[in-house]
Amino acid sequence: MSTTGNRDLSDLRDEVESTRRELGDTVEALAAKADVKSRLGDAWAERKVRLRAGLDRAQRSPAVVAAVVAGVTAAVALLVRRLTGRRGR
C-alpha cells in the first residue's frame, strides 16, 4: 500500500469517527426532546422557583399585594355587575 493510500484510509477513519460523534450527539438531543416527563419536571421546578421568588417579594411589600388584591376585586365586581345587568340603579 502506498503512503497516499494510508493517508486516504486515515482520513476516512477520521471522517467515520466524526460522523459517529455527530450521530451520537443527535441521538442524545432527540432522546432529551422525547423525554417529556423530564422536560415537564424541569419546567415545573422552574415555575416553583419563580413563584417562591414572587412570594418572597410579596411578603416584603404587603402594600403591593393589597393593591393587587383590591384591583382584582374591583375588576371582578365590575364584571359581575356587567354580566348581571346592574349598573348602579
Image: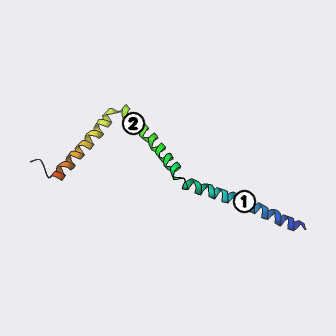
| Mark 1 neighbour density, 10 Å: few (under 14) some (14–19) many (20 or more) | few
Colour scheme employed for the rendering of this structure: rainbow
Label 2 to label 1: alpha-carbon separation = 49 Å
- How would you rate the neighbour count of disc 2 (Cα within 10 Å): few for under 14, some for 14-19, many for 20 or more? few
Secondary structure, mark 1, is helix
Disc 2 marks which amino acid?
A: Leu
Q: Which numbered circle lies on residue 18?
A: 1
Q: Which mark is residue 89?
A: none
Percent across and percent down for residue 20 are 71, 59
Percent across and percent down for residue 55 are: 39, 36
Residue at the spot 51% in from the left edge and 50% down from the top edge:
37
Looking at the picture, how far across and down is residue 38, in whole percent? 53, 48
User: Which residue: 18% across, 52% down?
Assistant: 83
Q: Is residue 24 above or below residue 60?
A: below
Q: Name the amino acid type tagged 1.
A: Ser
Rendered image quadrant of residue 59? top left
**In the image, 47: left or right of 16?**
left
On the rendered structure, is 76 left or right of 42?
left
Looking at the image, do the residues carrying marks 2 and 1 touch, with CB atoms under 8 Å apart?
Answer: no
Q: Earlier in the sequence, mark 2 or mark 1?
A: 1
SS at mark 2 in the image: helix
Q: Residue furthest top?
A: 60
- Figure check: 16 above or below 73: below
Residue for point 20% across, 45% down: 77
Which residue is at the front of the view, 66 or 1? 1
Q: Is residue 13 left or right of residue 67?
A: right
Question: Front-most of 78 and 27?
Answer: 27
Image location of residue 48, percent across then percent down: 45, 41
- Above or below, 12 against 87 in this view is below
Image point (90%, 68%), residue name: 2
- Residue picked out by circle 2: 55
Q: Quadrant of the N terminus?
A: bottom right
